[in-house]
Image (cartoon, grey):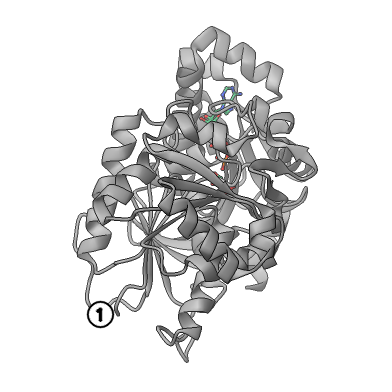
């Protein structure tokens, strides 16, 4: 099938979020973990390809290089329009990588301008006058200010993006968006004439996203969260470029025991962990102990648990505990020891017969998915907005994998996830 859109996501939960929102249209979406070694098969039914990278917090040059390779693969697969997916809370290091990757993509595909729209109204992320809100709070006043890897201490997307790009950053505000697609198109055109290559676009509801997508559907490169991308398939169908397949794909029925592995320390994950720990057998990991002794003790704990019991293993902790661990180990080392331990535990759980995995946290999901050797995910039913069940092959066995973004899902998400799988 001809490719309508080639997407690059900066982390794995972000990639499944994106694939879920694109799949709502019924169009077949393919999700690859990392840049595939092999070329795309001409008989592949997907009309949208998503490549999941783990580059959100990587050094700028490494991240740009990974994205360049993903772009090459997508171009080679026939894509001519592209989407760059980052977090709906604009998570980035002070140097990048949102702007640096966007600028490289623009240069490679010859795009004069792109938009930045991380808004995801269904999950409470809205942009007004260039400022990002999480629920009713400014980003910098939300729990994102305490993120273990990318603490967000400013809410102005213009100010956050400007140091990440060489070109000029501008804003198409809510007033421009509220005037409809034609007026927004004219505003973007005027900004192009004024030499503005990078345009933050306000959006506070799905209607705004529809307006923005209609005005920019022909752009060579769009960037943002999953919600703006989720508007594109309908426009492609209206343009007669694609139609959903008549027969829907049948999804596998995955038997085997289940586990939750959580490395996210977000406010919502903390509530979800507390809820599920009250319903299951639980083990809390301490980064300082892991740094000294590794994950062997936790693996032994796992071996002793009844196979069919509900279990959760988590490093999820309150901001003060995270800060203490980071002061002792350094921020990146604290993250790495936890990711390494949860990866080993995922491998051990698989060896012990676990086939249903719920993982919380984008970096954590990246580490675990890679440790399990997953290269391709089939998208299944959504558990909560932006969090689908996915299915993958590991050593000849099918596993079900739900990769949950830090702040997504309600308080009972982990229990809901397994119920959703039963009823899918
Ligand atoms: N107790 C802890 N102390 C220090 N770092 C921790 C601790 N627990 C987890 N971490 C690290 O914090 C980081 C959390 O990032 P991760 O992307 O997994 O979650 P998230 O940011 O909440 O999710 P998302 O990116 O999907 O929003 C990981 O690198 C993880 O290893
Ligand atoms: O956009 C989001 O918030 C998520 O898809 C994500 O990227 C979390 O890592």
Which of the 4 image quadrants contains residue 28? bottom left
Judge whether 29 appears above or below 365 on screen: below
Q: Residue placed at 26% from the left, 46% from the top?
A: 68
| Quadrant containing the C terminus in the rendered view | bottom right
| Quadrant containing the N terminus in the rendered view | bottom left
Query: Which one is in front, 83 or 365?
Result: 83
Which of the 4 image quadrants contains residue 206? bottom right
Question: Does residue 40 appear anywhere in the picture?
Answer: yes
Label 1 beta carbon less than 8 Å to ligand 2: no
Which of the 4 image quadrants contains residue 255? bottom right
Element type at mark 1:
loop
Residue 141 percent coordinates (x, y): 74, 30
Left or right: residue 99 versus residue 227 is left
Residue labelled with disc 1: 43
Judge whether 32 appears above or below 24 on screen: above
- Quadrant of the picture in which ligand 1 is shown: top right
Q: Residues within 10 Å of mark 1 (few under 14, many from 20)?
A: few
Residue 22 percent coordinates (x, y): 51, 68
């Amino acid at each position: 099938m001809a490719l309508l859109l080639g997407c690059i996501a900066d982390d794995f939960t972000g990639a499944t979020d994106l694939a879920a929102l694109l799949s709502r249209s019924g169009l077949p979406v393919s999700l690859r973990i990392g840049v595939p070694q092999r070329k795309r098969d001409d008989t592949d039914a997907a009309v949208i390809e998503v490549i999941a990278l783990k580059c959100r917090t990587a050094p700028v040059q490494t991240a740009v290089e990974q994205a360049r390779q993903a772009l090459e693969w997508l171009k080679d697969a026939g894509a001519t329009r592209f989407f760059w997916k980052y977090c709906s809370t604009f998570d980035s290091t002070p140097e990048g990588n949102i702007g640096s990757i966007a600028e490289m993509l623009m240069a490679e595909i010859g795009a004069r301008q792109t938009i930045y729209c991380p808004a995801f109204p269904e999950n409470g992320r809205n942009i007004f006058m260039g400022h990002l809100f999480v629920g009713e709070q400014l980003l910098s006043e939300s729990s994102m200010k305490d993120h273990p890897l990318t603490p967000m201490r400013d809410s102005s997307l213009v100010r956050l993006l400007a140091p990440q790009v060489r070109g000029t950053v501008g804003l198409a505000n809510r007033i421009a968006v509220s005037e409809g697609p034609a007026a927004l198109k004219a505003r973007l055109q005027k900004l192009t004439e004024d030499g503005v290559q990078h345009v933050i676009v306000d959006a506070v509801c799905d209607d705004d996203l529809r307006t923005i997508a209609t005005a920019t559907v022909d752009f060579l490169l769009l960037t943002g969260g999953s919600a703006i991308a989720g508007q594109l398939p309908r426009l492609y169908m209206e343009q007669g470029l694609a139609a959903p397949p008549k027969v829907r794909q049948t999804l596998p029925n995955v038997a085997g025991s289940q586990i939750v592995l959580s490395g996210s320390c977000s406010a919502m994950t903390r509530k979800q962990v507390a809820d599920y720990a009250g319903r299951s057998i639980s083990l809390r990991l301490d980064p300082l102990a892991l740094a000294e002794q590794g994950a062997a003790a936790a693996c032994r704990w796992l071996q002793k648990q009844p196979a069919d019991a509900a279990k959760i293993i988590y490093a999820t902790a309150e901001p003060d505990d995270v800060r203490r661990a980071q002061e002792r180990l350094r921020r990146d080392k604290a993250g790495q020891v936890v990711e390494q331990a949860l990866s080993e535990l995922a491998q051990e759980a698989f060896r012990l017969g676990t086939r249903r995995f719920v993982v919380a946290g984008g970096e954590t999901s990246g580490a675990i998915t890679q440790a399990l050797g997953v290269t391709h995910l089939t998208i299944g039913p959504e558990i909560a907005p932006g969090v689908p069940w996915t299915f993958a092959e590991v050593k000849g066995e099918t596993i079900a994998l739900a990769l949950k973004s830090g702040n997504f899902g309600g308080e009972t998400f982990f229990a809901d996830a397994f119920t959703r799988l039963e009823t899918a």
